[in-house]
Amino acid sequence: MKSSAGSTTTRRVIEVSDATFASEVLQADVPVLLDLWADWCGPCKQLDPVIHQLAEEAGGRLKVCRVDVAKSPALASHYHVMSVPTLLFLKNGQVMGQHQGLTGEAELREKLEVHLGMQL
């Protein structure tokens, strides 16, 4: 499946918008890893395969969502996103942690454990 940005996406990574954010992210019944990204962002493209790999591994234990900040600037503003990529770790609709900038797979796994109590 191809996203509008042209990158390959899996069914496990959910593209969200202003219209679907509440139902997909805030009302999720499992923890959420939210990737705030932009099509023009090189580091976002580098992080993309890691995000998709973790989504595949997590199965139903973690919901992985993406928000294109160019299409949903109000969401980016609400969460005080000043640069992309920004990752938010949410549980029960509450932000438990945040990371800005490119990160490696090992560091991202560690952050999932610290912020959401999840090991993948």
Image: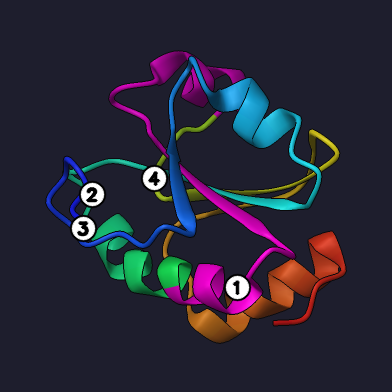
Residue at 39% from the left image edge and 45% from the top image edge? 84
Amino acid type at circle 3 is Gly
Sequence-earlier tag: 4 or 1: 4
Amino acid type at circle 4 is Val
Residue 97: numbered disc? none
Residue denoted by label 1: 108
Mark 1–mark 3 distance (CA, rounded to whole Å): 18 Å
Sequence-earlier tag: 3 or 4: 3
Q: Say which quadrant the C terminus sits in.
A: bottom right
Residue 70 location in percent, x, y? 28, 26
Residue denoted by label 3: 42
Q: Are marks 4 and 1 in contact (CB under 8 Å)?
A: no
Residue 119 location in percent, x, y? 77, 81
**Neighbour class for label 1 at 10 Å: few (<14), some, many (≥20)?**
some
Mark 4–mark 1 distance (CA, rounded to whole Å): 15 Å
Mark 3–mark 4 distance (CA, rounded to whole Å): 9 Å
Q: Are marks 4 and 2 in contact (CB under 8 Å)?
A: yes
**Neighbour class for label 2 at 10 Å: few (<14), some, many (≥20)?**
few
Mark 4–mark 2 distance (CA, rounded to whole Å): 7 Å
**Neighbour class for label 3 at 10 Å: few (<14), some, many (≥20)?**
few
Q: Are marks 3 and 2 in contact (CB under 8 Å)?
A: yes
Sequence-earlier tag: 2 or 1: 2
Residue at 82% from the left image edge and 35% from the top image edge? 94
Residue closer to the observer: 74 or 52: 52
Residue denoted by label 4: 84
Residue at 36% from the left image edge and 62% from the top image edge? 10
Mark 3–mark 2 distance (CA, rounded to whole Å): 4 Å
Residue denoted by label 2: 41
Residue 97 location in percent, x, y? 75, 51
Q: Is residue 13 above or below residue 88?
A: below
> Which SS class for mark 2?
loop
Sequence-earlier tag: 4 or 2: 2
